[in-house]
Structure formats: structure tokens, C-alpha cells
Image: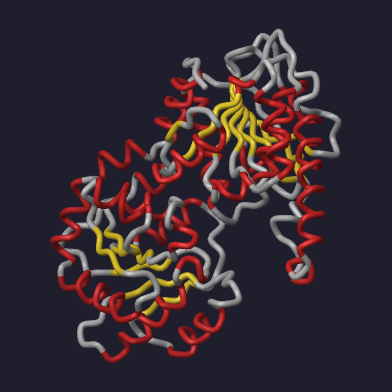
């Protein structure tokens, strides 16, 4: 397999990065892959590694700011500019007409960049593209691109949809592009995927075609962690950026309330990159200087460092708000199940439904309920040994379910079907 990094300033594009004759091609397109910080690097590397092991020639398309060498030995095209609609200025956020204009501009920009990246590529019919993180404007661009493809070879395009389906239904650009695709010869070549059973019916009704389920991918650095022994002392983790939609304010309040407890459990709390509503609570935790609370105030920029931090935990606190996570999935929830950790989650969420169905070790609390969250923390500490023993029973099943290899295998399996 050949490898290399191709930047937007280089005239090279996907056509020039493939040697012929070649293997079956899989292109991973992630317009959110901008740096080593966050899950995007881990996720795409895991998929690229698995695809290569299964015989694919793999290429990743990322933002121009991304250091493409981070994906070595896989090819990486850094083609997408910063998405100004995804990260609008405070001024723009107060002006709906500016947001609408940014949406239109970035939709056209994304369509132009994928067209340039794929210009002149001699596709084979069994080549695959996986487009991630579909907002309405991104799916509109993909639908328009796919509708315009002409043979003899046309790749299959898998798109991952997980946001509120009503956003798509209300988006004029998406509706127009989707109608264009539906009336084109390539309609069946675009395959929608989601990772939430709660979204399946709504997306099938919206898109007018079958939507497949493919679970979240957990990096092998997490799946290969040692499973905590039942006798381990409880260590409750609050990992990731502190955000209101992840319930950070109520979690921080519950941790502060343990200051005068006897036999307090330990906490590990990441505090880098808080949103506006969580920032005051980060400050309160820092100022409290509780001896049983470890503050991790830095961005985690490597899979190994994140796994090392994750390995110190036995319980993950995930009382996420239902407005965002009632139907959406959570990567850290999947990581917890695949590595034998206990989870504290919000009642009525997708996580709660999944934990019940898979008999995972969990406690569920009403969202934004401080008293019930404090009780759950006390209960998870007192029942820790039994909960860890139960969590260990599901590790083999969940580690396989959330593996990158299974994801690519299922993608290949879906590509052989002929259905809309």
C-alpha cells in the first residue's frame, strides 16, 4: 500500500493519489477532522486501520488545518476549510439571517471541495465512500454530487445521520438536493446509516428509503484496557469537555456536595474547554480544592493519553440532557460498556434504553436532578463490587459490537444489497 499526505495547496487530489491497478477503495470523509484533539482522529484512524486489514485502499479527507501525517501510513487529503457555520461568531449567533447565509455558503463550499477532491477519479462500482457527521447542508451537498455522477463506475456513498431529523425536513437546500438525487439513476448508490435505534423510523420516513444501523466505533486503546477488578476502589470519571448538554453543572454540584461525606469516592474531572454555562462550575471545582477530586485541566491529544486517563476510572458519570441526548448516541457510553465500566445515565435517554436492553451495569437518574444524582453516586460507591462484576460480563460482547473491524465488515455487507 502506498501512503502520503496531500494538502489543499497541492494540485494532487484523489485521482493522483491512487496507483493502478489498485485494491477496492474506501474514502473516509470527515469535514470535522481538524486536529489531534477530540474523537475524530481516533475514530478515523481506527476505521482506516480496520479497512486496510480487510484489504481496502484507504484515503481520509480532512480539514486543511489537520496535520495529515497524523494518519500515516494512510493517505490523507486536507481539503476542507474551517466550517464557519459550525463555529459562528457570537455576533453571527444573534443574527438568524447571517446564520442562514453562512449555511448556504458553507453548503456550496463543501460541495465544491468534494467535487475537486474526486475530480477525474476512475471509480469502480464496489468502491465505497463514508461521509460522516451529516448536517442538512452536508447531506444536501452529497446528494447533489451523487446525482451528478456518471459511469461506467459510480461508488457507493454511505452517510451517517444522527442529528434531529426535523432539521433536515426544514432545510430548503436539502429538500431540493434530495429530490434531485431521488430522480437520478444513482438514487440507490447513497445509503443512509445511523447508530441510534430511536432515530431509525424518523429517518426512514424523511428519506424515503431503508436506513441501516451501525454502532459507534470504540478505539482499540479503550477496548484493550484491563477490566477493573470487582474489588477495585470506586473512581468516578467525568471525561470530555464540560458542557451543559452533558449535564456538567449538576455533576459539578453533586461532586461539591460530597465534600463532607464519610468514605467519599474519588473523582477524575476533565475541565478543559468548558462552554459558557459550565465555566462557573469549573471554577467552583478548582477553588474548592477537594482532596478526593482530581482536576485534569488540559486537552487530551493522543489516544494513548486518553486511554491512560480512562483506565483510572471504574464509573462514568453521564447524566446527559434529553434535549440533545434523548435520541442521540454517546461515544463515551459505548467506551464504558466495551471496557467493563459502570455508567450513571439519564432516564429515558438512548443510553438508558440501550443499557436496559443489553443488561449493562448502570444506574439511571432523572435529568438535572441533583438529589437523585447524589443518591446514585452514593449507591454506585456502596454497590461498586457487584456493579463491576456485572459490567465485566458484557465486555466481550460490547468490545466486538463497537469494533472498527465489525463496522467495516458490516459496511461491506450492506454494500452488496440492492434496496431503497
| 64 relative to 111, above or below | below
Residue 137: image quadrant is: top right
Res 19 → quadrant: top right
Q: Decide: is 162 above or below 145.
A: below
So how many labels did they put on this image?
Answer: 0
Location of the N terminus by quadrant is top right
| Residue 347 at x, y percent in the picture | 32, 63
Residue situated in front as seen by the camera: 156 or 342: 156
Q: Position of residue 310 (x, y in %)?
A: 39, 59
How are the residues colored?
A: secondary structure
Q: Is residue 415 above or below residue 220?
A: above
Between 416 and 402, the residue placed more toward the observer is 416
Q: Is residue 52 left or right of residue 181?
A: left
152 is higher (above) or lower (below) than 167: above
**Which residue does the image show at 48% across and 87% down from the upper left?**
284
Where's residue 182, x and y in %? 65, 24
Which of 159 and 297 lies nearest the eye of the viewer?
A: 159
Amino acid at each position: 500500500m502506498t501512503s502520503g499526505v496531500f494538502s489543499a495547496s497541492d494540485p494532487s487530489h484523489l485521482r493522483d493519489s491512487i496507483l493502478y491497478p489498485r485494491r477496492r477503495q474506501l474514502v473516509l470523509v470527515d469535514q470535522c477532522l481538524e486536529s489531534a484533539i477530540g474523537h475524530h482522529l481516533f475514530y478515523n484512524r481506527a476505521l482506516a486501520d480496520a479497512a486496510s486489514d480487510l484489504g481496502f485502499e484507504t484515503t481520509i479527507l480532512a480539514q486543511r488545518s489537520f496535520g495529515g501525517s497524523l494518519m500515516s501510513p494512510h493517505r490523507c487529503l486536507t481539503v476542507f476549510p474551517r466550517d464557519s457555520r459550525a463555529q459562528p461568531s457570537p455576533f453571527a449567533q444573534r443574527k438568524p439571517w447571517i446564520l442562514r447565509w453562512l449555511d448556504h455558503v458553507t453548503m456550496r463550499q463543501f460541495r465544491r471541495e468534494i467535487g475537486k477532491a474526486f475530480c477525474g477519479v476512475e471509480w469502480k462500482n464496489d468502491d465505497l465512500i463514508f461521509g460522516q457527521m451529516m448536517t442538512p447542508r452536508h447531506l444536501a451537498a452529497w446528494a447533489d454530487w451523487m446525482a451528478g455522477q456518471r459511469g461506467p463506475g459510480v461508488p457507493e456513498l454511505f452517510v451517517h445521520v444522527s442529528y434531529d431529523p426535523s432539521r433536515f425536513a426544514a432545510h430548503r437546500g436539502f429538500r431540493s438536493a434530495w429530490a434531485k438525487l431521488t430522480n437520478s439513476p444513482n438514487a440507490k448508490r447513497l445509503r443512509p446509516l445511523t447508530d441510534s435505534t430511536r432515530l431509525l423510523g424518523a429517518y426512514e420516513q424523511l428519506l424515503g428509503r431503508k436506513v441501516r444501523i451501525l454502532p459507534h466505533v470504540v478505539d482499540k486503546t479503550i477496548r484493550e484496557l484491563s477490566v477493573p477488578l470487582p474489588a477495585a476502589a470506586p473512581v468516578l470519571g467525568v471525561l470530555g469537555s464540560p458542557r451543559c448538554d452533558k449535564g456538567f453543572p449538576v455533576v459539578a454540584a453533586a461532586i461539591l456536595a460530597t465534600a463532607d461525606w464519610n468514605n467519599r469516592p474519588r473523582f477524575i474531572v476533565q475541565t478543559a474547554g468548558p462552554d459558557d454555562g459550565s465555566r462557573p462550575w469549573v471554577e467552583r471545582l478548582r477553588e474548592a480544592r477537594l482532596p478526593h477530586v482530581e482536576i485534569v485541566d488540559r486537552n487530551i491529544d493522543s489516544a494513548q493519553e486518553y486511554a491512560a486517563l480512562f483506565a483510572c476510572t471504574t464509573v462514568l458519570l453521564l447524566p446527559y440532557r434529553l434535549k440533545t441526548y434523548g435520541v442521540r448516541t454517546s461515544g463515551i457510553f459505548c467506551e464504558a460498556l466495551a471496557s467493563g465500566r459502570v455508567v450513571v445515565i439519564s432516564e429515558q435517554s438512548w443510553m438508558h434504553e440501550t443499557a436496559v436492553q443489553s443488561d449493562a451495569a448502570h444506574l439511571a437518574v432523572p435529568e438535572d436532578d441533583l438529589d437523585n444524582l447524589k443518591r446514585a453516586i452514593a449507591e454506585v460507591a456502596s454497590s461498586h463490587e457487584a456493579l463491576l462484576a456485572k459490567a465485566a460480563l458484557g465486555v466481550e460482547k460490547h468490545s466486538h459490537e463497537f469494533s472498527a473491524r465489525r463496522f467495516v465488515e458490516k459496511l461491506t455487507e450492506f454494500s452488496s444489497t440492492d434496496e431503497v
